[in-house]
Amino acid sequence: MSDVEREATHPDLYGELASVGPYGVEVGHALITMVEPHRGYERAYHRWYEDDHFVAGAMAMPWMYAGRRWVATRDLQLLRYPSDSVVAQPVTDGCYITVYWLTAGRYEEHMRWTVGINKRLNRDGRVFQQRTHVFTAFQDHEATVYRNGTEGPRDFHALDHPYVGLVLEVIDAEAPEQRPELLEWLVSRHLPERLAGSPAAMVTVFRPTPLPGDRMTYVKQVEGVDTRVTLLWFLERDPRECWDPYFTDLDEPAMGRRELLAPFIPTVPGTDQYVDQLR
């Protein structure tokens, strides 16, 4: 790299930026993105995301410190409910989901970077167009409920620990003023009761934040910012082995509606495993 090129990248600024602001290890925010590759482009999408976008469009960015990809094969897609979900129509849409953790208090800094890098990737022809964002949102962490208290991995380990399954749950409160009541019911009563003796080690609870106005046009604005709650169940068993009864008789919240319950298994990095099982 020449001196001119080095100066253009402003390397000295990195030292200054690293010396200020929060840098804790707790989960502060998440990016949860569920995507449906267009039919016939499943392998091309998978290879683009894994070989390029997962790194260049996510993990290489400041304050994004963990990430993991998950997949729903056709048999897993058919377990989803409700069929009239407002999140996914048809409810089987969104066969890949990726989850990332962001450092607490660094959402704004990360967003400035992610908007800038995605504009650059788009300009350079490194954005895969044959896909639909079914459920993509940055989220603020509200709580984590553990099955075994202080034993076992913490939530900031969850994307690195070899969990066998993930369940995405989306609940909408009936009105914005009811979301605090919904969160209290989930964290204090519902989740502790459901986790006891279950195959889920923890549930992380989030609420979505609106995307900036200068986001990429192919990503729709987040819905339910004032009413929605997003839960991630981290499983120690394959969801196909424990779906019934653990996820078929969940209590419906009195102050809202469950809009999606969707199971996934982890992808195997560096392989095309499961690509031929999506349809």
Image (cartoon, rainbow, N blue to C red):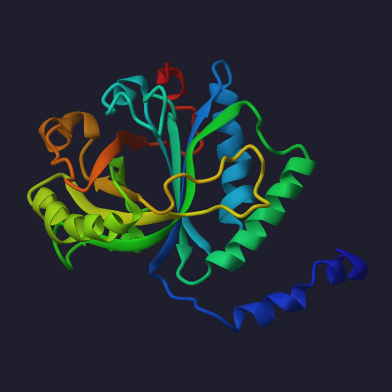
Tell me the residue at 17%/65% (across/down).
151
Residue 204 in picture, x, y percent from top left = 30, 55
Residue 246 drawn at (x, y percent): 13, 37
Residue 142 image position (x, y, % from top left): 33, 63
| Image side of residue 149 versus residue 172, left or right | left
In the figure, is residue 129 to the left or right of 140?
right
Compared to residue 152, the image places residue 238 above or below, namely: above
Quadrant (top left/top right/bottom left/bottom right) for the N terminus: bottom right
Question: Is any atom of residue 270 visible in this view?
Answer: yes
- In the image, residue 230 above or below residue 242: below
Give the residue drawn at x 36%, y 51%: 227
Of 98 and 81, nearer the camera is 81
Q: Quadrant of residue 130?
A: top right
Q: Nearer the viewer, residue 277 or 76?
A: 76
At x 13%, y 51%, the residue is: 195
What residue is shown at x 68% (from left), y 52% (from top)? 214
Q: Is residue 75 left or right of residue 117?
A: left
Relative to 249, residue 223 above or below: below
The tally of labels here is: 0
Q: Position of residue 279 (x, y in %)?
A: 42, 16
162 or 20, nearer to the observer: 20
Is residue 146 visible in the rendered image? The answer is no
